[in-house]
């Protein structure tokens, strides 16, 4: 059994752990090594699935993640929590999307990704992410638990919100909308981790730059906004560090005495 950490630091990816070239700065990699040496646990907090960022986690030696905006929580490789969407709800949204909206879906859990069809919407979104389009399986949700859906569209999500009040719809990219159980967020996932691992007394820090980091900032003890963050998030921050291109993470970790 691993001992209780001295602190936990949560990192958003795009605009935060990644620089503008979608790379991790050498100063950040060095800082993560120092954190772990000091018994401080680095955790990725992202809208992406754990399987999407497996290579990044291996490169950075980070083995804990708040994935899919809090819908899947892994701590040191162990699955701590998943927030599965009800199968009947998925069937309803799939039929509505197919028959009335002509919007394809992606089905995500913490291990796999599938799409309902391979067409231009899927190609546009996954090209934007610089990823291959996942395999096609429009029955995937009938066989495995699902924690997040994507609407592969450039518009149209407003039609869903009234019909599916049990779900949250967040546009995080020009070509897709994240869909998960209402009330889910990075902050929700963080609370599940702290409660399930009995870490509620451990000091927590978070780095972010966008509005999907807002609940995370309200949850942790010490929210840190990147210099490139949106103004609304900066207003919630305890400290505003340098940008994601100018060693912002390492500078803030040094300021707080974590490395």
Image: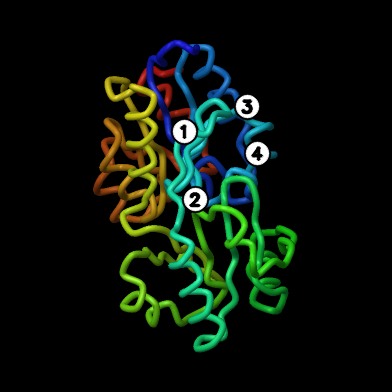
Marks 4 and 1: in contact by CB < 8 Å? Answer: no
Residue at left offset 45%, top offset 63%: 179
The single residue placed furthest to the bottom in the displayed view is: 100
Mark 4 neighbour class, 10 Å CA radius: few under 14, some 14 to 19, many 20 or more: some
| Residue where numbered disc 3 is placed | 61
> Nearer the observer, disc 1 or disc 2?
1
Which callout, 4 or 3, points at the residue further toward the start of the chain? 4
Q: Secondary structure at mark 3?
A: loop
| Residue where numbered disc 1 is placed | 80
Residue at left offset 49%, top offset 67%: 90
Camera-side residue of 181 and 54: 181
| C-alpha separation, residue under disc 3 versus residue under disc 2 | 20 Å
| C-alpha separation, residue under disc 3 versus residue under disc 1 | 19 Å
Marks 2 and 3: in contact by CB < 8 Å? Answer: no
Which callout, 1 or 4, points at the residue further toward the start of the chain? 4
Mark 2 neighbour class, 10 Å CA radius: few under 14, some 14 to 19, many 20 or more: many
Mark 3 neighbour class, 10 Å CA radius: few under 14, some 14 to 19, many 20 or more: some
| C-alpha separation, residue under disc 2 versus residue under disc 4 | 15 Å
Q: Secondary structure at mark 4?
A: helix
> Nearer the observer, disc 2 or disc 4?
2
| Residue where numbered disc 4 is placed | 56
| C-alpha separation, residue under disc 1 versus residue under disc 2 | 14 Å
Left or right: where 180 falls relative to 217? right
């Amino acid at each position: 059994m691993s001992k209780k950490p001295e602190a936990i630091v949560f990192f958003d990816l795009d605009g935060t752990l990644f620089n503008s070239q979608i790379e991790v700065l050498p100063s950040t990699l060095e800082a993560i090594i120092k954190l772990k040496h000091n018994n401080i646990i680095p955790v990725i907090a992202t809208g992406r699935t754990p399987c999407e960022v497996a290579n990044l986690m291996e490169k950075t030696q980070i083995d804990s993640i708040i994935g899919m905006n809090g819908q899947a929580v892994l701590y040191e490789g162990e699955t701590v929590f998943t927030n599965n969407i009800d199968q009947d709800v998925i069937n309803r949204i799939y039929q509505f999307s197919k028959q009335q909206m002509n919007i394809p879906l992606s089905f995500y859990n913490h291990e796999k990704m599938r799409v309902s069809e391979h067409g231009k919407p899927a190609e546009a979104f996954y090209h934007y992410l610089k990823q291959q389009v996942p395999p096609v399986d429009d029955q995937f949700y009938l066989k495995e638990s699902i924690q997040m859906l994507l609407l592969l569209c450039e518009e149209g999500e407003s039609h869903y919100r009234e019909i599916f009040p049990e779900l949250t719809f967040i546009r995080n990219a020009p070509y897709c909308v994240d869909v998960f159980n209402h009330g889910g967020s990075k902050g929700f996932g963080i609370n599940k981790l702290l409660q399930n691992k009995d870490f509620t007394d451990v000091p927590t820090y978070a780095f972010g730059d966008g509005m999907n980091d807002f609940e995370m900032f309200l949850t942790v003890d010490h929210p840190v906004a990147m210099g490139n963050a949106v103004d609304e998030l900066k207003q919630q921050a305890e400290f505003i560090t340098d940008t994601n291109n100018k060693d912002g993470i390492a500078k803030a970790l040094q300021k707080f005495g974590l490395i």
